[in-house]
Amino acid sequence: MNFADTITRIASENPEKSAVETPDIRLSYLELEQKINQTANAFKTIGLEKGERVLIQISNRPEFMYCYFAAMKMGAIIVPINPLYTPSEISYIAENSEPAIYVCEHSSQGNIRTVEEKSAKLIKSLVLDHEDEDMNFQNWIDRQAPDYTRADFDEHDVCEILYTSGTTGKPKGAMLTHHSLYTNADTYKETMQVVESDKSLIVAPLYHAAAQTNCMNTLVLAGATNFLLPKFDPKTILQTIEEEEITYFFGPPTMYTIILNNPDLEKYDLNLRIAFTGSSPLPVEVFHKWKDIFGFEILEGYGLSECSPVVTMHTPDGIKKPGSIGPTIDGVEVKIVNENGEELPNGEVGELIVRGPNVMKGYWRRPDATEKAIRNGWFHTGDLGYRDDDNFFYIADRQKDMINRGGMKIYPREVEEVLYQHPQVLEASVIGVPDPVMGEEIKACITLRNPEDSIDFDALSEFCRKHLAPYKIPRLYEVLDEMPKTLSGKIKKTDLRQWHEQKAVQ
């Protein structure tokens, strides 16, 4: 069983049920099934075979779903990537994954030459809305039959390769199987109590694991509806949630921060019953403000591309602990270990390691990286955290983000939580920067709720002093017009460090 099988079943049992919607398009499950089948037939006509890769560079459009589920039906391997990637960013991924088919939007057609040069297996590039009929994706699928019998394949075959961001070197492709993707979404559906009447707003990018598993695939398994928006705009999001009667919403913490800063927020009549977050820690201040305004909590969880992605999650009717990523989901195990791999007692900070059906097979064509990441059946996340006595987990920070100031270890998140409490601060990101005396010094990068304001850094330090030990207080501050973010909304600390280094040499 996989998601494509589920769509086929619902198309037969409830053909008129709305499957995917955009501001301009409404597709029933029967219509979605036919589009998927036409896409699979187009891929087959082009020459795609089982096990070959389909490189998908499409934003939040129904065509992403056509390609995603068509490749799945064929037993091919899905390789979704950021729609904003340039030739230099796509180069290694094309070389490593060697796609047979590349599908992109018109805005990304400049990448075609790079993919052709890097992939010896490439048969065809297709472009959405292209003027050339032979390259036009829509033209290819329109002339295909709407029926397709899916290929036979083992549930433990690789279904998708998700490439990591590659902030510390070349990106690595996490190999996820049909089984790992399906069971993770199915468990998540049960955890979040998703039902057929739910309607999800997907504004997080579909190439990202959370938008796929936590939204698209989870709603498909429930026979529910996905509504796609191509980009983040707080006013459009609030209007859409109200007008489309959205019940289920995912966004990274930065998205909630910006939404909550909207001066007209309380004017909207929202029917949300589930709002959840992940990808980076949710500031406690944001958690409380949302609860005060809407009367229910944002549910925080934790996951990684390598884990399909969900590992832990608060539940709608369970205990909510601000600052926690919740307990493990069913079937998944988490331990906190020291540098020697020994499990630590509750309350002590160590590395989170994960074991379960959600964990990847390994990294595509990277046995060295696989051996380093998966040891004795446990995936080593590189994240630092701890467990409390109720078996709820907490993230302290990424190992690579921890600051060592004169031998004193500082977790940036702890400082960021304090900065978020300041009434003028909208967003905060704390980094370690080189210092000739201390080794590393603490720098706080912030954006302001009112960009026209100025802020007194001495007063900000005094504010921090009320909540932090002296060695944890930032010595350097910088106000930014906006934070550098990934398309999924995660603040890019690597960019902040690079900007600091560039300014230091000027």
Image (cartoon, rainbow, N blue to C red):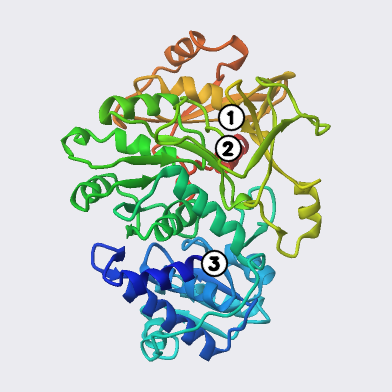
For the residues labelled 1 and 2, say whether their Cβ atoms are less than 8 Å apart: yes
Q: Which numbered disc covers residue 466? A: none
Type of amino acid at the residue the image marks with label 1? Phe
Towards the viewer: 38 or 194: 194
Towards the viewer: 329 or 141: 329
Quarter of the image containing the N terminus? bottom right
Count of numbered labels shown in the rendering: 3
Q: Which numbered disc covers residue 328? A: 2
Label 1 or label 3, whichever comes before in sequence order: 3
Residue at x 47% of width, y 19% of height: 418
Work out how far the residue at label 1 is from the one at label 2, CA to CA, in angstroms.
8 Å
**SS under mark 1:** strand
Classify 10 Å Cα crowding around label 3: few (below 14), some (14-19), many (20 and above).
few
Q: Is residue 301 visible?
A: yes
**SS under mark 3:** loop
Q: Is residue 161 visible?
A: no
In the depicted structure, whether residue 59 falls above or below residue 429: below
For the residues labelled 3 and 2, say whether their Cβ atoms are less than 8 Å apart: no
Q: Which numbered disc covers residue 393? A: 1
Classify 10 Å Cα crowding around label 2: few (below 14), some (14-19), many (20 and above).
many
Residue at x 42% of width, y 12% of height: 459
Label 3 or label 2, whichever comes before in sequence order: 3
Q: Residue 266 location, x and y as percent?
A: 19, 33
Quarter of the image containing the C terminus? top right
Corner quadrant of residue 475: top right
Label 1 or label 2, whichever comes before in sequence order: 2
Name the residue beneath numbered marker 3.
Answer: 1
Type of amino acid at the residue the image marks with label 2? Thr
Work out how far the residue at label 3 is from the one at label 2, CA to CA, in angstroms.
24 Å
